[in-house]
Image (tube, rainbow, N blue to C red):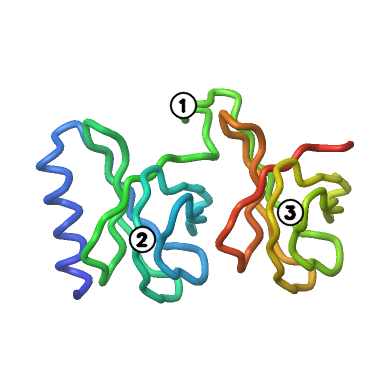
Amino acid sequence: MNKILFFALAIFAFSVHSNAQVIKTQIDGDFEGWEGETIFKMMNGQIWQQSSYAYMYHYAYSPEVIIYKTSSGYVMKVKDVEETINIVQINTSNSSNTNSQVIETQIDGDFEGWEGETIFKMMNGQIWQQSSYAYMYHHAYSPEVIIYETSRGYMMKVDGVEETINVIKLN
């Protein structure tokens, strides 16, 4: 899909949804589709999360996206992907959780995944601990993380890992 056609879709989406807000941006880094509660960090600084279950795989590096509001919430359209996905913004006071907070930092040193009560020391000095049981192995050195508040407590998303994990702050 060429750029003109892609942005024509944004104008169409805007005209179909008369009180729609259209955001044109790019995903910051690798995009590999969506599954479950996928997090999308955008080049404009916004952070969005998949809000309904769907699976779709498509690899692209920093693809252009259009985000628009419908009567039932926000939808994201990724360039060269037929499907759209329902999303919610997680780093704004306009989200459904008005006390939401997003922390962007890195794990201090080696990351080996999680296995029950794993403790994570962050580059910003914070220490977080896994608070729900899950096992996942992934090795990385000082990966970037996003920690955000949900109605179920804090969740942590590690760069390069599809799954998220519940965490609690220890300090």
Question: Dot 1: within a 10 Å radius of its alpha carbon, few (fewer than 14), some, or many (20 or more) residues?
Answer: few
Element type where label 1 sits in the image: loop
Q: Is residue 126 left or right of residue 3?
A: right
Residue 158 x/y as whole percent: 66, 59
Label 3 is placed on what type of residue?
Answer: Thr
Q: CA distance from mark 2 to mark 3?
A: 28 Å
Residue 43 x/y as whole percent: 49, 59
User: Up-down: is 95 above or below 74?
Assistant: above
Label 1 is placed on what type of residue?
Answer: Ser
Mark in front: 1 vs 2: 2
Quadrant for the C terminus in the image? top right
Element type where label 3 sits in the image: strand
Q: Earlier in the sequence, mark 2 or mark 3?
A: 2
Q: CA distance from mark 1 to mark 3?
A: 24 Å
Give the number of marks: 3
Q: Earlier in the sequence, mark 1 or mark 3?
A: 1
Q: Earlier in the sequence, mark 1 or mark 2?
A: 2
Q: Which residue is mark 1?
A: 96
Residue 136 x/y as whole percent: 68, 63
Q: Which residue is mark 2?
A: 55
Q: Residue at x 70, y 43 (%)?
A: 132
User: Up-down: is 84 above or below 93?
Assistant: below
Q: Residue at x 15, y 37 (%)?
A: 17
Element type where label 2 sits in the image: strand
Question: Dot 3: within a 10 Å radius of its alpha carbon, few (fewer than 14), some, or many (20 or more) residues?
Answer: some
Q: Is residue 126 left or right of residue 20?
A: right
User: Up-down: is 79 above or below 148?
Assistant: below
Q: Which residue is mark 3?
A: 105
Mark in front: 2 vs 3: 2
Q: Residue at x 88, y 48 (%)?
A: 125
Q: Is residue 148 left or right of residue 38?
A: right
- Give the residue at the far top of this rendering: 98
